[in-house]
Image: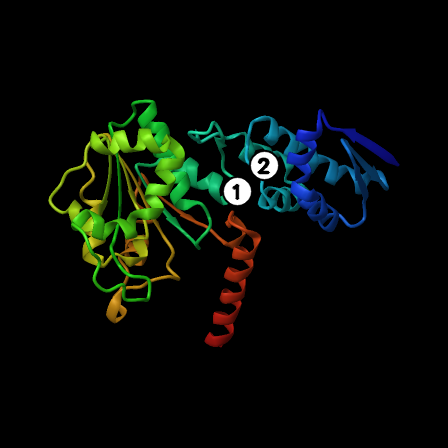
Amino acid sequence: MEKRLTFTDSMEARNVLGAKDEFFRILQKEFPGCRMTARGNELLFIGDEEVIVPPMKVVAILRELNRENTYLTTQHVRYSSDMIRQGREEELRDIYADTVSISARGRLIKPKTAGQKRYVDSIRRNLVTFGIGPAGTGKTYLAVALASYYLKNREVERIILTRPAVEAGEKLGFLPGDLQEKIDPYLRPLYDALADLFGYDQFQKLIARNIIEVAPLAYMRGRTLEESFIILDEAQNTTREQMKMFLTRMGNHSRVVVNGDTTQIDLPNQQQSGLTEAEKILSHVPGIGVIHFSDADVVRHDMVGRIIRAYADYYKEEDK
């Protein structure tokens, strides 16, 4: 059997097949039983029906995402291929049908994996959500995207983002400047996400008006945070006391997201992480959701997922 697909124009062909046919080559590796040829704006599938249908479904989904102005990556191609092979097309479409927010450049922010979908659904459904998992799973960015949606729709009056100022296994030494300038390096990932969602100029205006507040965790003590979307990032580096203090800052009409990776605890003197303790204590409390991410949810470069899996395998061997 032979099936021919014609793209609308060369721009659609480039977006769906990737720069220098990068996505197309991945598709060929994912479905080796199907012969695929790309020429200009045409894509040819050759093989038995059961062999050519799965890659055609993947291309159809990529085309739909492209029409919605979604920024396609190799992760979309690999994850879609894997889900289609497992017969989970409906679940995949449900994931990609969800729009969390819209970036300043007009791109739709969507979940990319089943884990991310569970995470955003938990944030919408629960007053407090814990997102626990490895780096690169989109925990921070999706939480900030949802916060921007709630703020734009006036469901909250402020966004408050915080993280503990703990150095990641290295001593930074003396930092020049005033207190805000000293803590800025710790908060940079949050600034980057906010600037992408609001645009740099609008972000600066919201900061100046105190509608968006980015501050170290120590600033939370003694406060009651009402009508706010509050995000605690890098929560694995909170102490038990800090975590309890933070969670009890929550006021009326607020929503809290706590993110962290329990494999990257940088607390000195082997202190117990407030995140691991909070998960044990609060996982069954009504209104609190706990979502665990795996390496399958990594949405950064493919290499990040491979690195995480390699480390996990190494530690398993060490523990034997």
Q: Dot 1, how many residues are within 10 Å of its Cα: few (below 14), some (14-19), or many (20+)?
A: some
Query: In the figure, is residue 204 to the left or right of 225?
Result: right
- Residue receiving disc 2: 91
Q: Dot 2, how many residues are within 10 Å of its Cα: few (below 14), some (14-19), or many (20+)?
A: some
The three-letter code of the residue at mark 2 reads: Glu
Query: In the figure, is residue 298 to the left or right of 222?
Result: right
The three-letter code of the residue at mark 1 reads: Ala
Element on which disc 1 rests: helix
User: Circles 2 and 1: CB distance less than 8 Å?
Assistant: yes
Report whether residue 129 is seen: no
Of the numbered discs 2 and 1, the one sitting upstream in the chain is: 2
Q: Horizontal and vertical percent for residue 134?
A: 44, 55
Q: Residue at x 23, y 59 (%)?
A: 239
Q: Residue furthest front?
A: 176
What's the mark number on residue 303?
Answer: none
What's the mark number on residue 114?
Answer: 1
Query: In the figure, is residue 24 to the left or right of 76?
Result: right
